[in-house]
Image (spheres, rainbow, N blue to C red):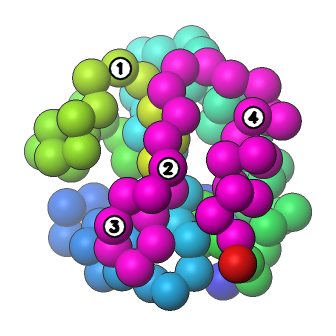
Amino acid sequence: MSGAVADLTADTFDQTIAQDAPVLVDFWSEFCSPCVAVGQAVTELAEQFAGRVVMTKVDVVAQPELAARFNVGSVPTLLVFKGGSPVGRLAGARPKTHIVRLIESHLD
């Protein structure tokens, strides 16, 4: 697991979230200004949590079926998965400290 943020598609999503490590998924859109700030925070946190958390993102315009599958009605929305199941959610633009708390609450 590196400090990079991977782009997920319908083809890569299920395999990625099935990992034992927590997987943070940033549901975003390029047309969403708050998504840019949250995305920047996620990118910064990818380095901080490298090796412990898999950081990913899903463009809801390109992958609407994934957004619908997890009831993502607004962006940005962050979901944390463990073993393929969603275990945490944070909707709306939030400070980086809130994202850190979300992630840390799902670390073993």
13 left or right of 96 in image: left
Provide residue 86's location: percent of width, then percent of height: 37, 58
Give the residue drawn at x 79%, y 67%: 49
Provide residue 57's location: percent of width, then percent of height: 47, 51
Please rate how many residues cluster around mark 4, counting C-alpha atoms within 10 Å: few if below 14, some from 14 to 19, many from 20.
few
Q: Nearer the viewer, residue 90 or 13?
A: 90
Q: Which mark is residue 88?
A: 2
Inspect this view and state whether residue 61 appears. Answer: yes
- What SS does tag 1 mark? loop
- What SS does tag 3 mark? strand
Pick the quarter of the image with the N terminus. Answer: bottom right
**Amino acid type indicated by mark 2:** Gly
Q: Which mark is residue 98?
A: 4
- What SS does tag 4 mark? helix
Quarter of the image where one finds residue 34: top right
93 left or right of 10 in image: right
**Amino acid type indicated by mark 4:** His
Asked whether the residues under the numbered discs 4 and 3 touch, taking CB atoms below 8 Å apart as contact, a structural biologist would say no
Q: Which residues are magenta?
A: 80-107
Residue topped by disc 3: 85
Give the residue drawn at x 49%, y 49%: 88
Question: How many numbered badges does the structure rendering display?
Answer: 4
Give the residue drawn at x 42%, y 16%: 31
Please rate how many residues cluster around mark 2, counting C-alpha atoms within 10 Å: few if below 14, some from 14 to 19, many from 20.
some
11 left or right of 85 in image: left
Provide residue 39's location: percent of width, then percent of height: 63, 37
Decide whether residue 91 is among the magenta residues. yes
Q: Looking at the picture, does residue 64 appear above or below residue 93?
A: below
Asked whether the residues under the numbered discs 3 and 2 touch, taking CB atoms below 8 Å apart as contact, a structural biologist would say no
Residue topped by disc 1: 74
**Amino acid type indicated by mark 1:** Ser
| Earlier-in-chain disc, 2 versus 4 | 2
